[in-house]
Amino acid sequence: MKTQGRLLGRYLSTVSPGELRWIGLRPARKEAMISVNHVMALAELGLDGDHRSTKTPGSARQVTLISEEHIASIKSLCQLDELAPELLRRNLLISGINLNALRHQRFRIGGALFEATAQCHPCSRMVEPLGPSGPANMLGYGGLCAKILESGEIAVGDQVVPVLAPN
């Protein structure tokens, strides 16, 4: 585990569980998101039905997550009245947990085990839903990328539970 992961891991036992609030799949690159209530998370691949699951096995970007709290910040910074999670093109919307505390850590959602790999930075595609300053306003609020370590079904309403990594 990287030094940063060990540092953040010191506090993982104090992080309370969050909740999975929304699931979105991208059937193909640049296509509209499809909202689902449950999905199979496939180890080393991604979410069943999402185009990323057909890409390079073992990728560090199999799943993307964003927090409801970060969406509220982005919405405020962009001066928007509403901001639907599918416009930000992340797979999982989480609430009640600081996603940044999960960086380089393992966590369980439903029957699947995930490991957060990196921040999910905004791209130029965010100009369309957020306006010209959208990508800049998303910096630090874009969520996380993760890989799936153990397959399992996940569903809206499942807890997001930090898992201490084995020594």
Image (cartoon, rainbow, N blue to C red):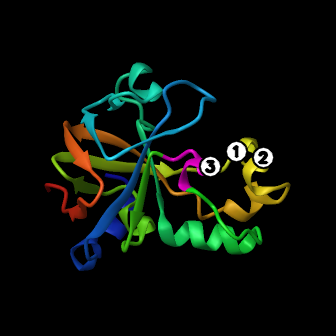
Labelled pair 3, 2 in contact (Cβ < 8 Å): no
Q: Which secondary structure lies at badge 3?
A: helix
Q: Is residue 29 above or below residue 70?
A: above
Q: Is residue 69 left or right of residue 106?
A: right
Image depth: mark 2 or mark 1 in front: 2
Q: Which residues are magenta?
A: 85-90
Disc 3 marks a residue whose amino acid type is Leu
Q: Which mark is residue 128?
A: 2
Q: Identify the residue shown where x is 37% and y is 74%.
A: 96
Q: Residues within 10 Å of mark 3 (few under 14, many from 20)?
A: some
Disc 2 marks a residue whose amino acid type is Glu
Q: Identify the residue shown where x is 19% and y is 36%.
A: 151
Q: Which mark is residue 144?
A: none
What x and y, as percent, mark residue 23?
39, 48
What x and y, as percent, mark residue 97?
37, 72
Instruction: Name the residue nearer the viewer: 151 or 115.
Output: 151
Q: Is residue 54 left or right of residue 150?
A: right
In the picture of the structure, the residue carrying the numbered disc 1 is: 123
Q: Which secondary structure lies at badge 1?
A: loop
